[in-house]
Amino acid sequence: MDNEIQIQTKVKRIKERYVHEAMFLVEQWRSLYQQTYIENGRQLKLTLDKAAEIVGVPRKTLEDYYYQLKKAETLIDLQNFKNCKIGVIRRIVKESKKQQETTTHLIDTNDFFLQENETNNYRKNSFEYDD
């Protein structure tokens, strides 16, 4: 009975990291991964998993932060959002993706019809032809 209560009381992590924390962790993680070191005369390199273990954050979380920050970097100036939580960045990326999908689809369709109208000469319908 006590085990069931303990399992049910486990809750997800509520604390959300700030952007500057996520940037720092990702920077540490990637630099550890890119560094090589010599052990017993052999040159070794850490794996992403091992580097994440050293940083103390799961690899999956760090990968998520890495890609969210990378996408956001192209959309906004991250320096202005350093004191915001990472959820704000997620929302910006998500909204940008939605806008991009809808506008790209509409633009492609409109461009198609504009190009078709420009390149095709006026066509007569079959009832307009003289016999």
Image (cartoon, rainbow, N blue to C red):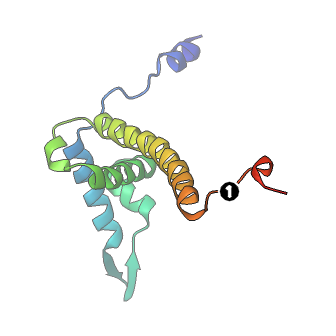
Q: Nearer the viewer, residue 107 or 6?
A: 107
Name the residue: 33% across, 72% down.
Answer: 34
Q: Amino acid at mark 1?
A: Arg
Q: With 83 as the anchor, is 103 left or right in this view? A: right
Image quadrant in which you'd find residue 31: bottom left
Q: Residue furthest bottom?
A: 41
Above or below residue 119? Residue 45 is below
Above or below residue 52? Residue 82 is above
Q: Nearer the viewer, residue 68 or 98?
A: 98
Numbered disc 1: secondary structure: loop
Q: Residue furthest right?
A: 131
Q: With 130 as the anchor, is 112 left or right in this view? A: left
Screen quadrant of the C terminus? bottom right
x, y (%) of residue 94? 41, 39
Q: Nearer the viewer, residue 78 or 6?
A: 78
Residue holding disc 1: 123
Name the residue: 58% across, 58% down.
Answer: 116
Screen quadrant of the N terminus? top right
Above or below residue 5? Residue 75 is below
Q: Residue furthest top?
A: 1
Name the residue: 56% across, 64% down.
Answer: 119
Name the residue: 38% across, 84% down.
Answer: 43
Q: Nearer the viewer, residue 117 or 74?
A: 117
x, y (%) of residue 85? 25, 35
x, y (%) of residue 10? 47, 22
Mark 1 nearby-residue class (10 Å; few <14, some 14–19, many ≥20):
few
**How many numbered marks have been drawn onto this rendered protein structure?**
1
Above or below residue 10? Residue 52 is below
x, y (%) of residue 38? 33, 82
